[in-house]
Amino acid sequence: MSRTFSSASSTALRPLIRPLALALALLLAGGGVLAQEPAGREPTVAELLRRIEALEGRGEATPVTEVAVEQERTDAPTFPTVRITGFFHADAAFYSQDTASKAILGDIDDPTGFRRARLAATGRVAENVSYIVEFDAALQQATFVDVWAQIDDTPVGKVRVGRYRQPFGMDELTSVRVLPFLERNQAFVMTPFRQTGVQVFDTAYDERMTWAISGYRFGTDPFGNVLSDSGGYGVATRITGVVQESEDGPLVHLGFDYSRNDPANGTVRFAGPSELFGGAANATPPSVPLFLDTGAIPADGVDLFNVEAAIGLGRAVVQAEARAAVVDQPSGSQEFRSGYVQARWMLTGEEIPYDRGSATFGRVVPAEPLQDGGWGAFEIAARISRSDFDDTASGRALTATTLGLNWYLNARTKVQFQWTHDELGDRLLGDGTSDAFAVRFHLDF
């Protein structure tokens, strides 16, 4: 059987011929070039390269050193790079209320829906410049989530520009992909969260410390926009430290956050449901009514203070935050308080890792995923949170107790079961209680 090689094939094989020929020449010269080496002494790389050049012949081929450089150039990364990532949360919830709760909130329907459905493109345009463009399609119209560019290794640290989570709050900066509960704690209503601005941040002391400062426009819409010629600016700072750690002992995290905001429209509002949405947030009509709502408060400015503390014990974590908001008004100031304490424990023994870059706890990886006979990993979690908004028009205070069971099928798929008991006090309508049972299916990629 005859074989025919095209010119294209020979061109493709040509780069392989010289290395193979050189290797064969070295083997054949074993009794000559290499045998000239005195016994007991190995030739250096430089000497080998010179000998290979001698075997090649003068000026008849590209030097081996140039071949190596060309190969290194071929292996160098090319930019831009793009990676597609995303996740979704499919929720179902069932509510039970007493008479007083129905009088305060109305009869809450049992919601089922997608809390989040996000798709993002992320990558790099240079070795030290990364980006992400992320959208959430769970709302009536797809909206911006994280849309930013980041420059690493600048003289002042890492610099991020765009729409991003502000450096305020340990729970807020924990990715929703790895939360042990379906939602963040109640104090979330008092945070600047995602705004459009510029942030400088970094780690220090072998990543035992993190620091960040961000300046932004305050009161952005779901697309990161603010329209105002009076006010509408804010600043947020966060500093954390691992104050104690040892190989066999606990990791102790402490942090402090501060934010100052000048509302664009001259008013501020703290509002949100309890610790369960049951479907898309900001839906019309809402999936779950607002348990807490200060209404629009005239404000010249708002100061936010937050203290963080956490203990990591390998398979267990205890975490707490206390937060206060001081609203400057023409007639004086008004204060609001909120906080929580939570604990989680891996029943199957996996570690809950601490992410030193974000100073938060990260993703659980099951030791035996749900495959090949494994059952995945199981975790229990509990949280108590309290918000005091008595000094408002609605005059409400909320205490929520939440218990959760998380089943990690693998590192990126989990089923979460949650029960939340709410005790809501209303200055005019009295005290009401409600219970919510919810389940979530989570998948990210």
Image (spheres, rainbow, N blue to C red):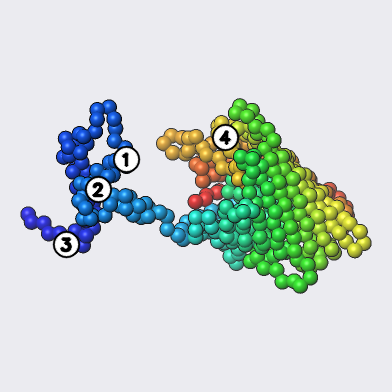
Please state the total of marks drawn on the protein image.
4
Q: Looking at numbered disc 4 in the image, what kind of residue is underneath it? A: Glu
Measure the C-alpha gap from mark 2 to mark 4: 55 Å
- Determine whether, in the image, residue 435 is placed left or right of residue 203: right
Tell me if residue 117 comes above or below residue 174 in the rendering. below
Does residue 111 appear anywhere in the picture?
no
The secondary structure type at the circle numbered 2 is helix
Image quadrant in which you'd find residue 135: bottom right
Query: Reading the chain from its start, which is encountered first: label 1 or label 3?
Result: 3
Mark on residue 91?
A: none
Measure the C-alpha gap from mark 2 to mark 1: 12 Å
Comparing 154 with 311, the one in front is: 154
Measure the C-alpha gap from mark 1 to mark 4: 46 Å
Q: Residues within 10 Å of mark 1 (few under 14, many from 20)?
A: few
Check contact, mark 1 vs mark 3: CB within 8 A. no
Residue 75's spot in the image, x, y percent? Answer: 37, 52
Comparing labels 1 and 4, the label whose residue is closer to the camera = 1
Residue at image x 27%, y 27%? 40
Mark on residue 6?
A: 3
Comparing labels 1 and 3, the label whose residue is closer to the camera = 1
Measure the C-alpha gap from mark 2 to mark 3: 31 Å
Q: Looking at numbered disc 1 in the image, what kind of residue is underneath it? A: Val
Query: What residue does disc 2 label?
Result: 53
Residue 336's spot in the image, x, y percent? Answer: 83, 52
Residue 24's spot in the image, x, y percent? Answer: 18, 43
The secondary structure type at the circle numbered 3 is loop
Query: What residue does disc 4 label?
Result: 351
Query: Reading the chain from its start, which is encountered first: label 2 or label 1?
Result: 1
Mark on residue 45?
A: 1
Comparing labels 3 and 4, the label whose residue is closer to the camera = 3
Residue at image x 78%, y 64%? 263
